[in-house]
Image (cartoon, rainbow, N blue to C red):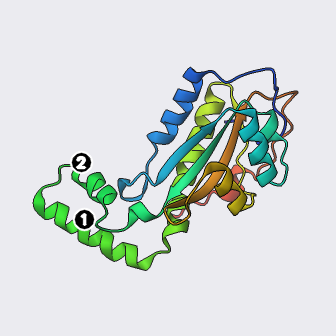
């Protein structure tokens, strides 16, 4: 965990292999999610043109053009509607007994009415993002989560329909150029409280 940091400048001469990208994306795919609905879609870009367009939509953050690959995470919205084909498929694959299946469907319908769907979906995507960045660090690949962007410009670049899904986070990946800067974190005792 000490290896991971928000890499601002990547070594443009080094490429992340397809095999390593598969490992990182699998870490995202296998992440936990509320109701097991896997609220994400991972959009992978290696093209210099796409990276340039994304950089322009992200306030010209240079890591987007120096990185090897960019993973943009789209948060599902429309498909999460109770009774949708997607939700039904996700619940049916678990082969619940009929009573349990009916209970989970009704519980989800009730829960759905209480939430703002997009922020909830984005929260699930952040779980997958954290797992991908940790997996990347485990194999010596750097990352930098980017939440600062102009949403409509990113939608235009990635051809996202905000009625169906929206952008949760953008993650450039690659290999650092130069030494890692110091990591500043609060101490363990400052952030951990045991209560029982």
Q: How many numbered marks appear?
A: 2
Q: Name the mark on residue 114.
A: none
Residue at the spot 63% in from the left edge and 32% down from the top edge: 136
Residue at the spot 25% in from the left edge and 65% down from the top edge: 104
Residue at the spot 60% in from the left edge and 56% down from the top edge: 168
Q: Name the mark on residue 104.
A: 1
- Quarter of the image where one finds residue 191: bottom right
* Circle 1 SS class: helix
Looking at the image, which is closer to me, 87 or 108? 87
- Disc 2/disc 1 C-alpha distance (Å): 13 Å
> Where residue 39 sits in the image (x, y, percent)?
45, 55
Dot 1 crowding, Cα within 10 Å, few <14, some 14–19, many 20+ = some
Seen in the picture, residue 99 relative to 28 is either above or below; the reply is below
> Where residue 17 sits in the image (x, y, percent)?
62, 21
Looking at the image, which is closer to me, 84 or 20? 84
> Where residue 186 sits in the image (x, y, percent)?
76, 53
Q: Quadrant of the N terminus?
A: top right
**Residue 62 visible (yes or no):** yes
Dot 2 crowding, Cα within 10 Å, few <14, some 14–19, many 20+ = few
**Residue 5 visible (yes or no):** no
- Residue holding disc 2: 93
- Considering every residue shown, the one lying at the far left of the view is 98
Relative side of 21 to 89, left or right: right
Looking at the image, which is closer to me, 97 or 38? 38
* Circle 2 SS class: loop
- Considering every residue shown, the one lying at the far bottom of the view is 114
> Where residue 78 sits in the image (x, y, percent)?
43, 64
Seen in the picture, residue 57 relative to 20 is either above or below; the reply is below
Q: Which of labels 2 and 1 is toward the front? A: 2
- Quarter of the image where one finds residue 42: top right
- Quarter of the image where one finds residue 140: top right
């Amino acid at each position: 965990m000490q290896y991971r940091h928000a890499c601002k400048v990547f070594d443009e001469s080094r490429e992340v292999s397809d095999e390593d990208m598969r490992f990182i994306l699998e870490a995202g795919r296998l992440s936990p999610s509320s109701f097991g609905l896997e609220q994400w879609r991972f959009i992978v870009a290696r093209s210099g043109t796409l990276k340039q367009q994304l950089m322009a939509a992200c306030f010209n953050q240079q890591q987007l053009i120096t990185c090897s690959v960019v993973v943009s995470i789209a948060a599902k919205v429309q498909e999460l509607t109770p009774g949708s084909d997607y939700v039904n498929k996700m619940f049916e694959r678990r082969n619940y007994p009929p009573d349990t299946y009916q209970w989970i469907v009704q519980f989800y319908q009730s829960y759905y009415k209480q939430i703002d769907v997009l922020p909830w979906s984005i929260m699930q995507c952040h779980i997958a993002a954290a797992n991908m960045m940790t997996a990347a660090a485990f194999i010596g690949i750097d990352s930098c989560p980017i939440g600062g962007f102009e949403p409509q410009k990113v939608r235009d670049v990635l051809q996202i329909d905000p009625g169906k899904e929206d952008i949760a986070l953008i993650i450039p990946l690659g290999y650092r150029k130069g030494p890692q800067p110091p990591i500043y974190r609060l101490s363990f005792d400052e952030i951990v409280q045991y209560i029982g």
